Image: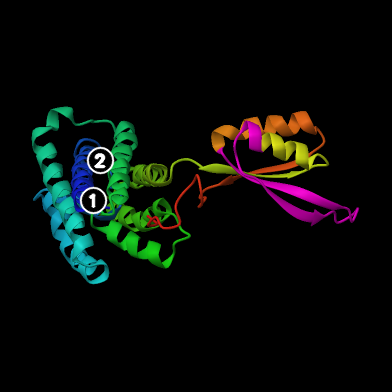
Amino acid sequence: MTYVEKITKKGTDYLLITFAAFLYAIGTSLFNDPNNIAPGGITGAAIVLNRIIPIGTGIWFMVMNIPILILAITKFGIRFTISTVYATVMNSIFTDLIAKYGKAFAVDDVILGVIFGSVFVAVGIGITFKCHATTGGTDIIIKLLRIKYPHIKTGVLFMMLDIFVILFAGFVLKDTKVVLYSFLGVMITSYVIDFVLYGRDEAKLIYIITDKTDDITARLLEELDVGATHIFGQGAYSKEEKKVILCAIKKRLSPLAEDIVREEDPDAFMIVTSASEIFGEGYKSYFDERI
């Protein structure tokens, strides 16, 4: 990558982070905060603390992030932390600006607040993560946990940490409904973050046991332009040697593959399962950073 390309990419990343911070702030200031919804994380804690000492949710968000950002510098280095500091500052500024000047657009409905607040916040977090930054707060803790536990998806880790903040909010606000609605918001946020970061199930993994292995394989290769692998197996009862077709295929092509099997061998034994991540040609690169 040339110097100009690097600068262009970095500029694009910062534009996206700015846009993500704006979405995050909309979710916080127009949907969550007006309805006393604590969406978890530092944002949820900031909303609760602002009820106790009303200096502004954005200011609380910034203050609570200072020690976490120091941790980020020691763990990830200054280059990563610069983009995270930028995202954190923009989140803080946008949150208080929208809260101050966007009151006319605030939604005074708990259900709508939970749903749309969670979606806006989650999309903001997801875009920021895709730009290899975080929104500060528990995002940094999540990134550390992802290094240690890469098999656990980001949205799930968010949900686990957010539970503690929600319980704190319920204790301070003394409102059971706040806890329940906040739990609902965390589940929505967790799902949307994973959707933004990973998309839907990327592919289907199909195992086909049939007497017409070659015919089905030929049609998969020619008609759908997908790869297939033959695995040699043996029937446990019949002891008969068989070639099993293993095929990773994009989700939208899965019904077509099933039709081919049905047409060639209605008696074929077929297992179709979801594959959340696939690396290799036509899918993800092995060298992409895990988010």
Which mark identifies residue 262? none
Q: Which residues are magenta?
A: 221-250
Q: Any magenta on residue 67?
A: no
Q: Residue at x 13, y 38 (%)?
A: 99
The residue type indicated by label 1 comes to: Thr
The residue type indicated by label 2 comes to: Asn
Residue 146 percent coordinates (x, y): 39, 61
Which mark identifies residue 32? 2
Instruction: Answer whether labels 1 and 2 touch (C-beta < 8 Å).
Output: yes
The total number of labels drawn is 2
Quarter-wise, where is residue 115 in the image? top left
Which mark identifies residue 43? 1
Residue 152 percent coordinates (x, y): 46, 58
User: Which secondary structure lies at badge 2?
Assistant: helix
User: Which secondary structure lies at badge 1?
Assistant: helix
Quarter-wise, where is residue 18 in the image? top left
Quarter-wise, where is residue 234 in the image? bottom right
Callout 1 crowding tier (Cα within 10 Å): few <14, some 14–19, many ≥20: many
Q: CA distance from mark 1 to mark 2?
A: 10 Å
Q: Residue at x 24, y 55 (%)?
A: 42
